[in-house]
Every structure is written in structure tokens, then in C-alpha cells.
Image (cartoon, coloured by chain):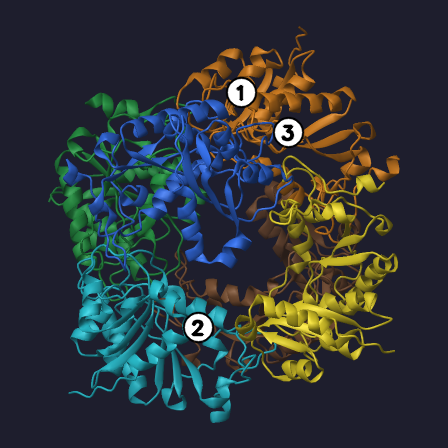
Chain colours: A brown, B yellow, C cyan, D blue, E orange, F green
Amino acid sequence: MEEKIRHHESSSRFSGMATFLNAPLVRDPILLDIALIGVPFDGGVENRPGQRHAPREIRNMSSLLRPIHHVTGVNPYDLCRVGDMGDIPFPHALDLEASHSDITKFVSEVHNACVVPLCVGGDHSISLPALRAIAHDRSVGMVLVDAHTDTLDEELGSRFSHGTPFRRAVEEELLDPARTVMIGIRGPRSSTEGFTFALESGIRVISMEEFTEMGVQSVIAETRRVVGASRRRR
Amino acid sequence: MEEKIRHHESSSRFSGMATFLNAPLVRDPILLDIALIGVPFDGGVENRPGQRHAPREIRNMSSLLRPIHHVTGVNPYDLCRVGDMGDIPFPHALDLEASHSDITKFVSEVHNACVVPLCVGGDHSISLPALRAIAHDRSVGMVLVDAHTDTLDEELGSRFSHGTPFRRAVEEELLDPARTVMIGIRGPRSSTEGFTFALESGIRVISMEEFTEMGVQSVIAETRRVVGASRRRR
Amino acid sequence: MEEKIRHHESSSRFSGMATFLNAPLVRDPILLDIALIGVPFDGGVENRPGQRHAPREIRNMSSLLRPIHHVTGVNPYDLCRVGDMGDIPFPHALDLEASHSDITKFVSEVHNACVVPLCVGGDHSISLPALRAIAHDRSVGMVLVDAHTDTLDEELGSRFSHGTPFRRAVEEELLDPARTVMIGIRGPRSSTEGFTFALESGIRVISMEEFTEMGVQSVIAETRRVVGASRRRR
Amino acid sequence: MEEKIRHHESSSRFSGMATFLNAPLVRDPILLDIALIGVPFDGGVENRPGQRHAPREIRNMSSLLRPIHHVTGVNPYDLCRVGDMGDIPFPHALDLEASHSDITKFVSEVHNACVVPLCVGGDHSISLPALRAIAHDRSVGMVLVDAHTDTLDEELGSRFSHGTPFRRAVEEELLDPARTVMIGIRGPRSSTEGFTFALESGIRVISMEEFTEMGVQSVIAETRRVVGASRRRR
Amino acid sequence: MEEKIRHHESSSRFSGMATFLNAPLVRDPILLDIALIGVPFDGGVENRPGQRHAPREIRNMSSLLRPIHHVTGVNPYDLCRVGDMGDIPFPHALDLEASHSDITKFVSEVHNACVVPLCVGGDHSISLPALRAIAHDRSVGMVLVDAHTDTLDEELGSRFSHGTPFRRAVEEELLDPARTVMIGIRGPRSSTEGFTFALESGIRVISMEEFTEMGVQSVIAETRRVVGASRRRR
Amino acid sequence: MEEKIRHHESSSRFSGMATFLNAPLVRDPILLDIALIGVPFDGGVENRPGQRHAPREIRNMSSLLRPIHHVTGVNPYDLCRVGDMGDIPFPHALDLEASHSDITKFVSEVHNACVVPLCVGGDHSISLPALRAIAHDRSVGMVLVDAHTDTLDEELGSRFSHGTPFRRAVEEELLDPARTVMIGIRGPRSSTEGFTFALESGIRVISMEEFTEMGVQSVIAETRRVVGASRRRR
């Protein structure tokens, strides 16, 4: 079986059905080490919607990628079994919190099968239900590369919009702020409360300005220091 | 005051702040006969979202329109007071039914001031809360020009999606099916239940095929016959 | 098995892997009545290439189509088994005639399984190898809706470009010109030889101008008259 | 010489330098019957500029056209000598009236060589200087297919904007209104004065609404009747 | 009144009429510290026009910006009164020099009210009339970040095109070359006369190549040195 | 004659027929030092075709470039005679190897006239026939700036696709690997054989990662060292 779970070497990359990274379509996570999961959902976004279409478009584009790195010569598909599990269904797509539950349920099944879930597409609100799936029994660290900290308390009358997931995750003890680093923060906000929460909770925030001063190597070292920090069990 | 509620004759139409049809921005409906209302909401749409941006883009484009018709010579802005009232605010934009309530509330205020509300933008689900505002005390007729009848019972787990508003409106006795005509229906569906409801409730459905056979003049005559049918109840 | 070969009723049409018309992906033609076949090839085109990408893009767009016609109420997927067989592989994609052979071979297997092949995408040169697959043992009639007759003798130094397939097909006795009708011809040419061949071989050419004069119903009647003309030979 | 003034039959139409309709580039009008002249000027336009780029883009697109009509079999390049004379230079491109003079001067040279000038590109204000070149000694009739009558008295503080050329042309007795027909007029205006001038001067205005009612054949007949009306003067 | 001159905190930034930076629309400069002024004019541009549409599009985009900087925590709208004064009207939009006068007149009123004018949109020729408004009584220094020095003597037959404003400004003693720095110059030219004028007049020109060598901090220091230099009164 | 072979100083760069860099159209190479040659061919490309349209589009864009460098003040058109020789014709455009022969033939004529040929447009496979034209009698060095080494042995069943030219060129002793440097290599591949060939043949490959570490000046120095290395005559 494992033989079949390999990167598909199509002579023409644009040919056939697109999958994430041209990985095989595998519905059963038990056959995989890493599961690529499409999340066609944007019910938590404030401004420009359309992330519901992201999984399909990312499949289209990423299927053109070839596997072997030009410097290391490594082919990741030789190291582990990677598959595209298709998209999470959203039978209640117009209901934000019900859809978040659907994400948690799907990702939990993958996580419980000891497979690494890798969610693709969807607005940033989906990070919270994904964390609920993988961190329900112990808080995790996180490396976030983003323009915003996404630690607002409320946005558009909701505590679950795309500007709030990491505040909820800290409150729900899914995320360990002491092992969390946010890199490249550069987006202005309408209030300071999101920044304040991130800093006061102990998250290491590296703004774009600080990133430029530190340089890539120092940021990597700092990131390793933070995420490797003490791991509190609840 | 009336003098000021006129079409703005800018020498360059692309200049200045865009309003619907280049009409004056008037916050108080009492000054108007017809109120143009932006509805930047797309929380009820299934496939391509983005209608939340429609009011702004329709303002941009429609502000280029000039007022005097080339055949009739009529300037509608001489006949009545038309104004752009801005956009309905959506403090709970991620909640479909709460947002529908916000629409009903805003449009009711316009309607209660004896002003004709004209909603622009938003996905088709907004028709239901608009009808709730203007037809709460007696059912109305309707002329719909659309590809679909939008009379599904449920879609994406919701009874209030953009595929359902006219079924709800009939059920809530906002819409009088005997005085309702739907013109240009041409979109296939996943089930027949929407078509069945429209026909069984007594709505006059003119498909695109029938439209082509009848011709424009006959469709107009038929439309007048249907919407003029008297019906008193409640 | 038949149960599984049905139209996939996804609540969100943009979700999951795109297939032609949202039909199931079926690799074995024996399970089908109609096989949708992607032909990602444009090695025969003169001007704008890119038809190699057409199968994928047509899958994306056509997967949004819903199955039940709004007037007839017919669901074609209830009437026969339709499936997407994926794309024809092109191991010699830079060689026009070798690729034509690959098309003939793939389509022949479908045709020999008594399944109707429906080729999607690719430049117009692919019509010749498709006809070779289905008409090798007796000539067939054809209804072509196109701007050009595609009956040049040679183009760009090749007898197999996208401007030549129906001349070759008549010469190879794949196409019976007496039962062939070409509708909507409207494209100017650099020489008259293509028009001359079509007319002299007995093909019924209905130009766009004639189409407009005749009207849709008359063109349909004429088309039936032509393609229904009996002709036994070989 | 005449041999050389023919349509260039390039095997690949997108190859080489683009000219209007793929006609030869001929700087001397004496070699031509019809001169195609690029007018890269948009200094008279109100809203969307960019017509200065039109000659180049129309060369690009029109060079793809092939010469022989699919029904008549006529090749116009066999009937007369057609050439692309390049673009009119605009040494004072930021000065509307000076640029109009440059157009008149260039087109006059072509006209005086007894060659038919065909101006391509530029905003609609260029019609006036072109008419000054060809009608300075006797007024001409005109068939205009346009959305507007372009008979305003003044626009943006100028009597020579793109909304005014045919009023000026009537006033300057370049255009004979009794032999002028304007077809397809459908654009609303900020005032009625343009319509009024057109009608009162005796121009035959066929609005889009009238066009639809009359049908194509009747419009052609009416057009012939109008432009054929004899009028000798001056 | 001051209370009202604040940044508008709309929950959805794309909602309502767009203004520059989402600042309030304020017609009277006396209420402001900084006036944002739209200049929908491109009558001085050589190649790609369309800057007349820039104010509207910049309003659309900039209204999405949020006010509080992610590092400094500063909200500029707490520090001073900023408003959008709408667009300068151009009653003679097709006349370059008349339009320049309209700009000077509008900006002068703002400047004379001791308000800082900030012009948005329009081609680069508008810099000259803006300088005439604010520097008519004493020359000013300038920090320019641009690809070109815009110091040609004449372009397209005009001394007021978008390639000439800073030569005119030096000649009219609006600009003090000793306190002027031009940063990032990288555009080739058809002649050397523009570069020569800039250098000979004493302007400090920092090409893109020099910028890269110096680094951001040194360029800032050099810029401060130049613009802080001696201020000659006429 | 030389006087005429100069950069055309059009006042409006978008005016008239576009040529590469606005250079004069010169059909005879004997008049030139550097010949710009369009290669409208993409029959060797795997994924996105369209390079056949590149010469025309590059003419459009490059004709906007002005000649005098802003720092050096050098006008290359004063130093040598540069002309646009038009496009190579492809009478067998659907045949990859025949078209390669047509390229070699055209470029040879330029090369044999002691003129430097500069090919523009076409997919990367055209490098091989160009090298055959200029290096048939002695191998040359090369500086390649690209994402890939293009040293595959075979692709899409062909030894002459756009992924193979430099392997063929080494094998045919057109290219001297000891004097060849490939800069900026960063594209992953489906196999390691292309990288292996490049390295084993002695080509100096500077990956994007190495480029970043070395810096621009060191890469230039290294490039000079490599291409200046010993020149073996066959």
C-alpha cells in the first residue's frame, strides 16, 4: 500500500485532477504521515471574502510544484507519506460556530489517527477549531508568520472572527503563550487591545521592524528558544 | 431644502465622492421620495461571495450615469427627490439572522417615513428582511427578474440563504404569489423542490425559453396582468 | 456499482476536487454510458496556445453546474451513467503526430467498450484522431458548430494542424460529407481553398449570415435532414 | 510598385511588426487607394482616457484578421491598394486645438493626394479636424454609429471636446445635416441641448429603441435614403 | 466641533462612502490641521493617462487602513485634525495651464487658512501649481522620492508637462535647490538636460544606486542635512 | 547610412510601430553592430505556452525605454549600431526540430556577418539552436541567470524541450562547462539528474541560497573568474 502513497510523477503537471502538491488523494488518514486538508470556509472574515475557493486554487497552483529541492536534493515524499484528504464538508456553512465544530471534528479524527494535519485555505478563524482538535489535552506552542496578532477580543460582534483566534486559544489553554512567537507583525489596528493582550499574555511578538533589525538567522534562533521553552501540562 | 435634493451636475463625473447614481448623500429619509440604500452584506451566499463590496462598486460605476433619457427626455430627478442614504451598518456581520434583523430595522424606518426604499448590493438573501420591512401588514406582489426562483426550503443547513428568500416570504405572507411574476428563470438546480414550490404556490414563472417565445411586449402585458390582480386578505 | 456512478450532490459546489460537470471520477469505461475525457494538448494550434490547460479549467467551471433543467425537470444523470475518466496522457507532448496517435488509442478503448466518448479541451486538431477512433470501420456524419470549416490542406507546414482535421477526415473516409453540416461559419481566411474543399466535397455549410436568415428552428430541421441522410458503403 | 502594396500573408499572424489589418507600412500616400492612419491622441476626452494607446493595440489585434470573406470570397486587398501610414505625430500633444490642427494637416495631405483617409484610434474629438481636412470645400454627409450624438455646445469649458465635434462640423458647414444619419443613439445626457441641436439641424437620429423596432434592413434603407439626398451648395 | 473631526471607526471598513484614510469629509479647512485634497487631473502626462481617476481609487483603498501603528501605538488622528476636503473642481479640464491655476487657487485657500494641504492623485505636473500656492512668498525645500528629477525644460511642446515641474519651480524661486533632495532617481531619459539642470542648480540627487550603497539611515541623515540647510529669503 | 541607424527619438514613445527598444527596423545585418531578433516560438515548452507572442509584447513594452542612463549618462546607441531585424519566420512551426533548424540558419547569417545576435522571446529551447549558430566552430562560455539549469536529458519524450538545451550544448561541445556559470538556480525538479549533469560536467552553479550569502559583488567577481577561465579550442 505504501508504494501507492507517493508523489505522482505526471509528465505534464497541469494534467489530470489537481491535488495539493500533486500528492495522491487519500481518504483514509491511517495510510498517511501528513494529511493535507482543504478548508473551504470564509465565514469569519471581515473584509475580502473568497477563501472558500482557496483549497481548489491552491490545489491548482501547488500541483505544479516538483518535489526535489535544488540544493538539498531531498524529496520529502521519500521521507514520509503525504496525501490530500480532500475538503472538510460544511453542511452548515452559513453558521460560523457550527462550521468551527465541523473543522474540529474532522481534524480530530486525523490527529487521533496520529497523523499530522495540515489545513489549507479558509480564513484565519479556522486556526481556533484546528487548535481545539490537536491541543484539547495539553497546550501547544506556535510559530505564527502573519501581519496581525489576531488576538482581538471581539470583532463584528463575534468572539470567533478571523481577528480573534489566538486570544480564544490562550483563554481556552490550547496555546501556551510562553512558547508562542509571532513573526512579521506589521498591520495597524483600530485599537491597541489586541497588541496588549498578546504582550501581556507573554507571547513573543517580533514586528516587521524588529525582524529587519535582527536578521533572518537571529529570528530563527529566537524562535527556537521560545518554542522550545518549558511545556506546562494542564 | 428641496432645491438641494437634486442630481449633482458635476462637470467630471468621476470626481469627488461617489454616490449611487450621483444622487446627493442624504441621511434623513424625510427629505426624500426614493431612498437608495447600500446593503454591504453577503453572509447568505453559497458560491462566490463579495457582494459586501457591491454598494461601493455600484456607487463608483453608477455615479457615471447621466440623468436625462435620450428618447423620452425625462430627468427623473426633476420628478422626485432621490438620495443616497449610505450603507446599513452590520454590527453582527458574521451572524446571518441578526444581520437580517438589522436590514429589516433600517428599511422599516425608511418605509415608515413613507419613502420608497431601494436596496442596492448584498446577496439575494437580503430580499426577505426587506420584504419584512415593507410588507409586514399586508402581502405585496413582486416582479422578479432573475435566473432562479430562490424558493428552496433550505440550503447549506439554513432556511435563510440566498436560495430561499421567496419561499419564506410566501410562508410569512409577505409575498402574494397570485400577484408575483418571476421572469427569465434559467438556472438548473440540484432538486426540483424550488420549482415545485413556486408553481404550486401560484407564482407565474416565465422561463427564459418562454420569454424568448413571448417577446418583450407580451411579457410586459402578462406581468401587468399578474401584479395588477387584486387580492385583499388579512 | 451503478449507485455510485451518480452526480455528486455536494452542498458547496466549489468544494473538493473538480471533475467535469461534477461527475464521478471513473477510470474504467465499462462502468459508464458516457465518458468525459480531458485532452490537455495544443500542439496543433497556430495563434493563441493554452488549450492544454483547458481540461482543468473546464473542470473547475463546469463543476458548478447543477443537473436538473429548469424547464424539462430532466436530470441527465438519472438517464445514463456519466463519468470523468481523467486526462489522456501525452508522453510525447512535443510531437504532434505521436500525440494524435495517443488520442486515437485512448478514445478507441472507450469506443470499443461501447461507451460514448466526449472529448474536452485541446485545440481543434484533436478532432481527427478522435474520429479515427470512432469511425475507422465506417464513415460518420457530423454536426459542427464553429467559425471555420477547418478544411485546409496544410497549415504551418503541417497537414495535421488545427485548420485541417476535417479535410483529412474526409480523405480518410472517416467523415461522410453528405451527412455533415457546419453551422455558424464566419471566419475569414487567407485563401479560398478550405471553403472550396468543403463545398465541393458535399458538406452543407451554413454561414452565420445564412443562420441568421434561416432562424434556429430551420437550421435544426436542415441539420436533421442532412445528418439523417442514409449512406451505406465499405 | 503595386505588386508590393498587398496584404502580407504571414504564416503566423502574430509574427513581426503589427500593422493595421496586416497591411503594408507605406509612408507615401501616392502609392495607396486607402490610407489607414493612426491617431494616438485623447486630449479631448472627459472620462476614461487611454485612446492615445489605441492605434498600437488596434494594430496588434487587427493584424490577426485574414483577408478573404467567408461568404463573398472577396479579398479587398485585390480590389484596391491599402496601406498603414503610421501615426500622426503630436508635437504639442498637451494642447487640444494645436493637436487638432496637426490632424487636419496630416489628413489633408492624404485627401489632397486623392487617397481615402481612414483614421484609427483617438478620442471622438478627432472627427472634427478630420472633417476639416476632407470637407473644407464642400459639406459632406455622414453615417455615424455611436451611443451619443456628440453635438454639445461646450464640455469641460471647451468647444472642442469629444462631446462636441458634430455641432462644430455643422456650424462650420463641413457636415450637411440633411445627409447625416446617427444610428444607435442610447446614451443619457446631463442636458437636452445636444439632442435638440441634432434634431433641429435636420440630422436623422435613429435611437437604439427605434433601431430595434425598424430592424437592420430598414435602417440600411433609411440610411441610404438620407445620405443619398442630393445637396449642392457653396 | 473638534470631537467630530476624528477618524471614523466603522466596524466594516469597506462600508459607506470612501474617504482618504477613512477621514471625515470636511469642506471647511478651518476645522482641520491637515487637509487631504483630491486632484483628479492628468492633462500633463505623456504616456499612460488615468491619474484623473486616482483620487477615487486611492479613497477606496486607503479607507481600509486602520489608524494605530503596531509598534509605536500612535494614532495620528488623536494628534491632529485630519479631513478629506473632496476634489478640486476642473471647469477647464482640457486646458493644462487653466487647470494649474485652479489647483493653485484651491490649495492657496487651504494654505492661507494655515492648514497643511496634502494633494492626492493627478499626474506629476500638479506639483508646480501646488508649490505656487504654498511658496509664493518664500522658496521652500523639498524631499522628493521619485524615479525622475522632472526637471526638463520642455516636453510635448509644453513647459508645464509632468516632466518639467521642478525646473519651473526653481526658475520661479518657489523651490530652493540648496534645500532640495531627490531620492531614488533611476529612470533613463532621452537627453541629459534634465539631470544637468538638477545638478547645476544645486539639488542633491541620490540615485537608486547611491541609495543602495548608502543605506536607509544614511539617506535619512543626508536628507535632514540638506533640507535643514540655510534658508534664503528672497 | 550610419546616421540613420540611431535610436528613434519619438516625442511620444507609444506612437507608431513598436520595435525592440525603439531601435530602427533594419532587415540587413551588415548595417548593424548588434541585431535584435524576435523568436516567436514556444514549441519546446512544457507548462504555460505563449512565448510565441513574446517578441510582439516585448517590442510594445521595451519601446517605452529611453536611452540615456541616469547615472553614467551613456547612450548605448551612440556607441554602436543597434537594430531590430524583425522575427525569424517559422514555416514549420508545429515541428520542434525543424524550427530549431530555422533558428540556427537565421542566427548564423547574422553571426557570419560579424554582428552580435540578441534573441528575444521564445521558450528556453531556442538557446540550443542559437548556440549552434554562434559556437559551431569553437565552444563558448556562458553566463545564465535562471531558476533552472535546463540540463535534463529528456522531457516529454524529447531531447530538445525547454528543459534540455544546455545538456545538449555541452554534449555537442558548443558550451564549455568550465567557462559556464549558472546564477540564481532555485527551481525544484522531479529528478536529480539535471543537477547532477551540471555539476559533474564542471559548470559553476550558484543557487539562489548561495547568491544571497555571497552578495552581488562576489557573484560578479566569481562570474568573471569562471568565464575568463582557460579556453580550450577543439
- The three-letter code of the residue at mark 3 reads Phe
Camera-side residue: C89 or D144?
D144
Give the Cα distance between marks 3 and 2.
Answer: 55 Å
Residue E226 placement: quadrant: top right
**Disc 3 or disc 2, which is closer to the eye?**
3
Foreground: disc 2 or disc 1: 1
Which chain letter matches label 3? Answer: E
Q: Disc 2 marks which residue?
A: A17
Location of mark 1 (residue): E160
In the image: residue B27, left or right of residue E21: right
Number of marks drawn? 3
Tag 3 near tag 2, CB within 8 Å? no
Check chain identity for marks 3 and 1: say if they share one: yes
In the image, residue E105 above or below residue B174: above
At label 2, which amino acid type do we have? Met
In this picture, residue D135 sits left or right of residue D183: left
Disc 1 secondary structure class: loop
Could you tell me the amino acid type at mark 1? Phe
Residue E90: assigned label:
3
Q: Is residue C90 left or right of residue B200?
A: left
User: Where is F90 relative to A75, above or below?
Assistant: above
